[in-house]
Amino acid sequence: MLQKANHLRIINTRNLSIILRERYLARVWLSCKSDHVSSMTEVKTTQSEINNHINCAPHSLEENRNVKSKDRRKSLTQCVAWVLSLTEEDRSKYFQTKRLSEWYAGCAELRDQIRTNTVSEKYFTLLEELGVARECTSKMVELWSNKEQCDEFDHILANSNECTRESVSESFDSFLKDNRYAELFLTFNVIKARATLAHHDWSLNIFNGESTYFDWRKRRIKSVRSETGQYGYGIDHPTFAVELGIGCTVQCTFCAFAAEKHKENFDFNNLENQQLLRALASAFEEVMGAGVGGGMLYYATEPNDNPNYIDFVNLWYQETGWKLCTSSARYDIEWIQNLTEFYGSPTPMMWPRLSILSRHCMEKIHRHFTPEQLGYPWLLAQQIEVEDERAKVPGGREKHGLKKLKEVRDCRFYDTPEEVDLESIPQGSIACVTGFKVNMINKTITATSPCYTSEKWPLGYRTYGTIDFTTPNSILPALKQLVNRVMLKTLPNHAPIRLRDDLQLRIKDSGFWLVSACQFHQFTNHSFYTNLGEVLEINNSRKVPWTKSEFIQELMKRLPNQSPMAVAAFFEKFFNAGFIDETFLSDPAWEL
């Protein structure tokens, strides 16, 4: 990996995707190269092998498994609790390192100077004006210009669930003894990584309920991880996104959602609209339980476009007890002030996230707010200066993302895993919601989940069905009807069987491969896989695909010594792995 990537990883652990890089790469290569172990029966072998191929759960954090749902808010405040526990002097030092890290990420010239330990007087002076002491800059340059120390910290972050504050100090030993700024910065990032992993563990493994939404959600998460690789491991799959308007005034050229121009806002001053949002919150809580706190009130919209956005978020908070997250690309000072006040009381939260579109925006914000005033919200560099470090998603607008998509060479362009440089494959989506996308103007609820951007799915997410609502009383019945129709526990016998549309089927001598943009799933070295591959290939060539019962019957013809129950059980494993297409359920002509 290039040195520049190592250095950036230290200061930009966005969505945990980079922290999980080593884990993800290890999983991919292990699944690609693992030797299959024979057992006494085909059934046991195939079930154990399919588990090795498709179980995508992250490392479990056992100490978090017994935490009640609503107490999850506590684990997400570990970072804040640590900051609050510091002395006033140490807290100031940490906030300065945070501000410096935002300049490191968002200013290419400064970043290059830090890496080569040649920071100019211009930047020392500028940073001092913005609240970063000269000593802080000098001490952090010692860390970021040292490749060996950067590599060591990458290792610590990748194993953060086994790491303690003391082990950070031990790993850096004498280096940190004289560098309190670096120690505080590294310790915070380990705590943040651990808290994020704990939240992911809850979101992906513990969050559950009676609704078939949860069965569907697990399949979609496995599908997203198969399809988008590193990105799929980095997101925690929010349960919903509610759009409080139509369109966006920012109109970023790189918008992977291709947000249309702003047209209309959902009016907070209309009391019926408030009732609609309350009813939506109540419906989500009945269907998803704690998932009512796991979403956002924006998607292909800019929160600042709705003048009453904070009023809506506060209404949701009053109704459910959950403060939803906010990400904004607006750098209006009054807007940022109002957001920080909302999320800063009664105890600080690490929101909002501010997407920074230029160095000018960042400097304006930093000149107005001290490091302490923006100590908890985080700034995400999105300006053009970052693109050599983090390329934009190739999707969305025709003239920008979709044009670049045609140039991408992902795993499907290569014959073997060994030929692929996974680091060169761009992030395939900015979508994150695995659940429901709601538009309050159009009064629609859509089942959706992320996918790798394609010509078929140019916005980086699939849709599985949409339903309308009209009044507050109609929302819960509509939501349940949508869940019952498209979020099934299992496919009925008359359902058509197709592979997920991004997958390449490659027949091999001893089985088959399924290749996505970011992964090779190898099903080989067993007669069961050989026969399954043949059936999949024939089915792919059919104009009208086999139904589930027909597919299993065709497979049984080739496996006369297998029991129907065993073959059906294997099919369910394959289906639950997210390899089977479910978007046909959105077709009104198809009936359960």
Image (tube, rainbow, N blue to C red):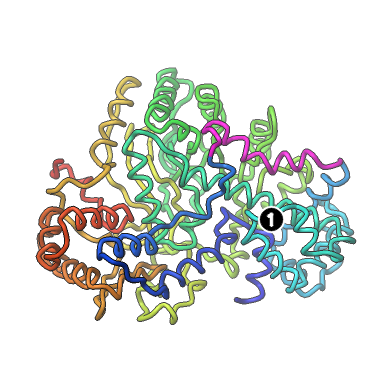
Q: Quadrant of the N terminus?
A: bottom right
Badge 1 element: loop
Describe residue 128's horizontal placement relative to residue 411 as left or right: right
> Looking at the magenta stretch, what is its main secondary structure?
helix
Residue 20, image x and y in percent?
Answer: 56, 60
Choose between 413 and 530: the one closer to the eye: 530
Q: Is residue 407 magenta?
A: no
Q: Residues within 10 Å of mark 1 (few under 14, many from 20)?
A: some
The residue that appears at 51% across and 43% down in the rendered structure is 202
Up-down relation of residue 209 to residue 219 (above or below): above
| Quadrant where the C terminus is found in the figure | top left
Q: Quadrant of residue 447?
A: top left
In magenta, the rendered stretch is 66-87
Quadrant housing residue 214 = top left
Q: Residue visible at 42% across and 69% down?
A: 31
Left or right side of 158 for 544: left
Residue at position x 25%, y 70% in the image: 529
Q: Is residue 14 visible?
A: yes
Nearer to me, 545 or 11: 545
Residue at image position (88%, 45%) is 89
Residue 85 within the segment the image draws in magenta: yes
Badge 1 amino acid: Cys
Left-right relation of 555 to 199 = left
**Place of residue 566 in the rendered image (x, y in percent of width and height, measured from the top left):** 21, 56
Image coordinates for residue 127, horizontal then vertical, percent: 82, 56
* Residue 412 in the image: above or below residue 71: below
* Residue of label 1: 163
Percent position of residue 489, x then y: 27, 42
Q: Is residue 100 visible?
A: no
